[in-house]
Image: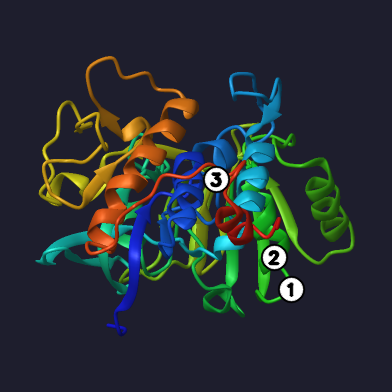
Amino acid sequence: MSDAIKTDVLIIGAGPCGLFAVFELGLLDMRVHLIDILDKIGGQCAELYPEKPIYDIPGIPLVTGQGLTDALLEQVKPFNPTFHLNEMVEKIEKIGDPLFRVTTDAGQVFETKVVVIAAGGGSFQPKRPPVPGIEAYEGTSVFYAVRKMEQFRDKELLIVGGGDSALDWTLNLQPIAKRVTLLHRRDDFRAAPHSVEQMRELVASGKMDLKIGQVTGLEGANGVLSAAHVKGNDNATFKVDCNTMLPFFGLTMKIGPIADWGVKLDNNLIPVDTEAFETNVPGLFAIGDINTYPGKLKLILSGFHEGALMAQKAHRYVYPEKRLVFQYTTSSSSLQKKLGVN
C-alpha cells in the first residue's frame, strides 16, 4: 500500500460536474484530486457520447460530449487538478473532524478534508461477455481494462470487440505483444475510421490477425488461457491460440461500493440537502446525477449549480478559521489573477 496522498478535496468522478467543481473549489484556494474508474476524463460524456450533440448547456447552443469535456479541462487548467484514472474507490473512512481516509482498488490511499461524490449514475463497470466459464480466467488471463501496457508484453493477445476501446488497444498493444488477434462479430466497426484503417493496414502487412465471429468457449488449465473457441458467421467453429484475452463489450452502470461508504441511499441515489448538497455524513457531498432531493432535475447544468454551492460549504471544512467573502470573477482582481487573466 502506497503512502497517503494528502489533499483538501477528493472528487470521485471526473465527468462534467466533477470538472466544474474543480473550478469552483479552485477559486476558493482548495487543492483537488479526482478519481475515475474510466481510463479517460469526461465521464458519460466522453465514454458514451463523445460525438453526440448536447443542446442545453447555458450559452452554448451546441457542443459534443467530448467538446464539453475539453472546454471544462481548459477552464480548470489554472488550478492543476490531479487525475487518478482506471481506479475505483473501495473504502471511505472518517478518521477526523474533518478528515477522511479513502482507498482505491489500486491500493492508493488519500487523506482529505472533504469528499465529493460526482459519480453520475454510479461506476461504469465492464460488461462480462456471455462465455461459459470465463470467470475462472478473470484477473489472470482475461482482463476488462488495461492498467499497465507492460503487463501484455510478449503475450499472444486476443482482443474482442469493435468499438473505440478495442481498436485503440489493438493499435497500442500490437507493437509490444507477441501476436495480436482482433475478433469481432462482423467485418464492420464502430470505431474512429482512422483507427480502423490503421488496423487493416497491420492485417494486410501480416503484423496482426483479424477474425470474424464470436467467442463460444475458452480452454486452459488453472486460469491460464491457451485458446478461445470461436463460431464464425458461417457457423463453422475454429480455435484462436492465445494466452491473454481483452474483451471490450461496453460498460454498464452500477452503484458499486457506494452502498458501503456510510451514506444513506434512496433507490441507489444519495439524498442531500439543497443548501450545500451535503449527505448525512458531514464533509461528504454528492453532486450531479448520483444525488436526489425534492425537485431534482438530472441535467448537467443542475450539477454545475450544485458544485458551486458545495464549494462554499467545503471551504468551511478546509479553512475553518477563514471568513469566506463572496466575489464575482467579473470584478474581482484576485480571482482574475488566479485564472491568469489579470
Image: 152 above or below 115: below
Distance from Cα at disc 3 to Cα at disc 2: 21 Å
Q: Which amino acid type is marked by label 2?
A: Asn
Tag count: 3
Left or right: residue 66 versus residue 95 is right
Q: Are marks 3 and 2 in contact (CB under 8 Å)?
A: no
The nearer-to-camera label among 3 and 1 is: 3
Q: Position of residue 247 (x, y in %)?
A: 51, 51
The residue identified by callout 1 is: 175
Residue pushed farthest top?
Answer: 295
Whether residue 334 is visible to the viewer of this picture, yes or no, is yes
Q: Secondary structure at mark 2?
A: helix
| Numbered label attached to residue 172 | 2
The nearer-to-camera label among 3 and 2 is: 3
Q: Which amino acid type is marked by label 1?
A: Pro
Q: Which amino acid type is marked by label 3?
A: Gly
| Numbered label attached to residue 42 | 3
Left or right: residue 89 versus residue 41 is left
Distance from Cα at disc 2 to Cα at disc 1: 7 Å
> Which of the two residues, 30 or 238, is positioned nearer the viewer here?
30
What residue do we see at 43% from left, 53% from top?
A: 25
Display coloring: rainbow
Q: Residues within 10 Å of mark 3 (few under 14, many from 20)?
A: many
Left or right: residue 56 versus residue 37 is right
Circle nearer the N terminus (3, 1): 3
What residue do we see at 30% from left, 65% from top?
A: 104
Q: Residues within 10 Å of mark 2 (few under 14, many from 20)?
A: few
Distance from Cα at disc 3 to Cα at disc 1: 28 Å
Left or right: residue 267 versus residue 177 is left
